[in-house]
Amino acid sequence: MQTYEDDNKKEESSTIVAILDNKVDVMDYTAAFTTEEVFTSREELIRWTHDVGKKNGLVIVIKRSDVNVIGRRPRIIFACERSGAYPKRSTSMSKQNNDLEKKKRPNAIGTKKCGCPFLLKGQMLANNQDWMLKVICGLHNHHSAQYLEGHSFAGRLTNEEVSILVDLSKNNVRPKEILHTLKTRDTFNVTTMKTIYNARYKYKVRELGGRSQMQQLMSKLHDHNYIEWHRSDDDTNCVKDIFWAHPLTFDLLKAFPSVLIMDCTYKVNKYKFSLLEIVGVTSTAMTFNVGFAYLESEREDNYIWALERLKTIMQDDILPTMIVTDRELALMNAIEKIFPSATNLLCRWHISRNVLANCKKLFETNERWEAFNSSWNVLVFSATEQDDYARYPKALVYVKQTWLDKYKEKFIAAWTDFIMHFGNMTTNRAETAHSKLKRQLCSSQGNFVTLWTKLYSLVELQHTEIKASFEKSLTTVQHSFTPSVFKELRGLVARNALDMILSESKRANLIGIDISACGCVVRHTHGLPCAHEIGEYKREGRPIPLDSVHSHWRKLDLVCTSYEKSAELSCTPKMEMIIKSFEDSDGFGKMQIKRKLKELTDPSSTFLIEPTIKDKTRGRPSQKLDKSTRRDPSRFEYVVSAQDNHSPNIMSSSTTTKKPKGQRKMSVSQTKAPKHASYIDSFPFGLRPYICGVSDVVADGNCGFRAVANLIGIGEDSWAQVRKDLVIELQSHFNDYKRVFEYAGRAEEVLHSLLYFENNPGREYWMTMPEIGHIIASKYNVVLLHISDVLNLTFLPLRSIPLSRSSHKIIAIGFVNRNHFIEVFMLPASPIPPIANSWIKYHEPCAEGWATPYKTNIIAFKDLVFEVTTQETIDLASQ
């Protein structure tokens, strides 16, 4: 019988032969692996061996493991991954078989094996479960690896790392961030991105468990108690439309049923289905998702089906009183049929963009257009009906025929000021929900399972924020509401409603109890006490009563409710109908009923199949303006070409504006997309629809100054002049800028970076933000927008007296790829980033009015773009 000692001698003799056969330099690692440590488990021994190997640039693998051999203590033989030799192919194989084998084998093929003699032996001790390690041969006939990245075995994930990967994947963490997390936890981790992708794929396959995508979706919806409906093609069983809603939707809708906002978005799934997103508004002005409907097409029938599903989760006595949409005729018709008692208002923002697209081209000068646009805005927000457009006959025809004659009651203040809309007159909440969703998806090629997974986490977090806003209104009392007039409202009314009441209270000090001066708009539109009511309470010396506030603002909880009639929860009559139908059916009919019943009790058994992927779709391109513009062929669609547009006054430019020297004429194109459209993807998602184009400049380290030179009209090649101008500005007001930069020595550093007038400067001479942004705005008396995924700020002149709004020169630069500046061209009246904090703190009193015209633009930006970086200590050149 062969003994254990015989095995040891055989292992040692084989290593000597290997060393003699390989006449190469050997490397001795005996000392590194020699240890007297006693390991308490097999896993601890293996982990120690692998770690020591990594530290020395070696990949150690288990060559043989004897654990449950009768009559022998458990042992492990470790070897180098390059031990052994690649098996030679049989010489008797025919030439034909050789050729066939070559065709099957990949082109790049090889072996790492070089007969390395390195061997270790781990063995369990006789008296307990401990282990010890012995070096049989510590020699390697090859050099150690300089980098272990790329060694597949060394990059394997441990069970703990796999568990972390699964948890992070469930929470929608990107693969590159998962890899960074693993490397942060373990400094010796040499895993590559390919390993992460493979591990995620294995997890997804294991999770599917052999189910189809639709079976997996139905299973997840059922497991999480989602409300779900779908309809499919009778012949192919392919999904046509699908609707789902979170189980908490019922309670949210019961609490806040009054206002719903509906809008479609595109490019959110690989099937090219439109997504109808339905949102509501809480008392604390938080948006909540009511339901998601993926529609095969945007016909009236599809909308009717989706709205019928929505109506089924609402009680008949609690239906929406007001629904906001854009001018999507099919959706408007469906709303009229399914919710006939609801008022359908049109989004003022979409209307404004369509008036801009269709009317601006009718005016010879920018001044005439701005005069018309101002008159139009006065009409929209006017409390009385008026018609004063005789001076603009062509534009008058458009606004009358398209908007005023048919839809004036749906967006003009003279009518909407008598509708309880709680301040919701646009679909911006739905647009913001689209933006959040697309940021969460990160791709437009996901399937329904991927979409549900991302939406699930998004909606769960949304509900957490809503509950937090309720608690804040219940527990926090702002100092502004300590006066006795508010004592019956504190802690019982939403904080944003209290803010509006406070504003009306200040008005009451001016108008008293004069109803005609009050107008009572807040009472009609928000259900809150208006100025003259509050004036009456103050005169009587009593607080504002709680019952004067609409119940919408007093709802600060989500109490679970149930149907009062228990009969409504009984399915006995329905089951009797199913049994009768089953008995009356033929063999095929009975099979169909059984299959449908099985799908109800076990959704993962569904026979539904995924929809086919469409080759072409009507998705919303970022360059086009609006769905209502896109769907009406008589409407004018345009794209401002990034190659031609170099107007320095982007937000008030006209196609007929005369360009300064060194700039090209701005053209309107209906054929080409921007040349550098890929750069637009580097900017915040919600802002992209407002970017009509970008223009690149030479990337030589002076790109920021080149972009500014082009935008102010002196030409890209005059970048050195821009540097000189900024140096003069900084030196002339050096002490002022030292305060603005709020960092000792920063002014000297900026001056040093500007004093370089050669080509291809190093990083220390690049344009740095936000410091140089203040200098540019003040030197050239312009409004400078800085847009990127790192920093979004608006810079205003620090010392000059404000010009009239129409004379403001607005220029925008973008920072892309963390190393390059480009020119950015925005649509008129676009949202703009917040104003730099340093300007707010340190501008001269005479410059105060610069910020006034942009308050609404900044609010719009904050609604569209989340997690905006506005810290003013970021050096973009170091990013």
Image: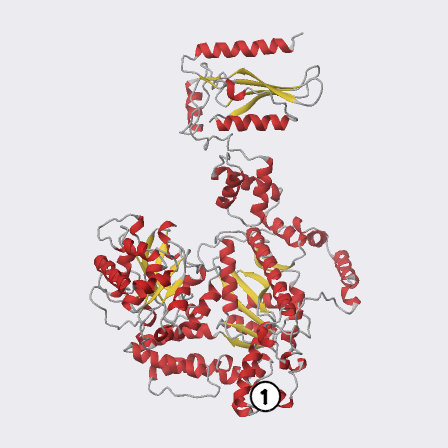
Residue for point 66% across, 21% down: 67
Q: Is residue 536 above or below residue 302?
A: below
Residue 33 percent across, percent down from the top left: 53, 21
Q: Which secondary structure, mark 1? A: helix
Residue drawn at 24 percent across, 52 percent down: 756
As drawn, the residue found furthest toward the left would be 661
467 or 361: nearer the eye?
467
Residue 71 placement, left or right of 291: right
Residue 663 at x, y percent in the picture: 23, 64
Give amino acid for label 1.
Answer: Gly
- Report the number of discs: 1
Q: Which of 71 and 616 is in front in this view?
A: 71
Splitting the image into 4 quarters, where does residue 455 fall?
bottom right
Is 721 drawn above or below residue 544 in the view shown?
above
Residue 181 percent coordinates (x, y): 52, 43
Q: Which of 830 and 626 is in front in this view?
A: 830
Which residue is identified by label 1?
Answer: 535
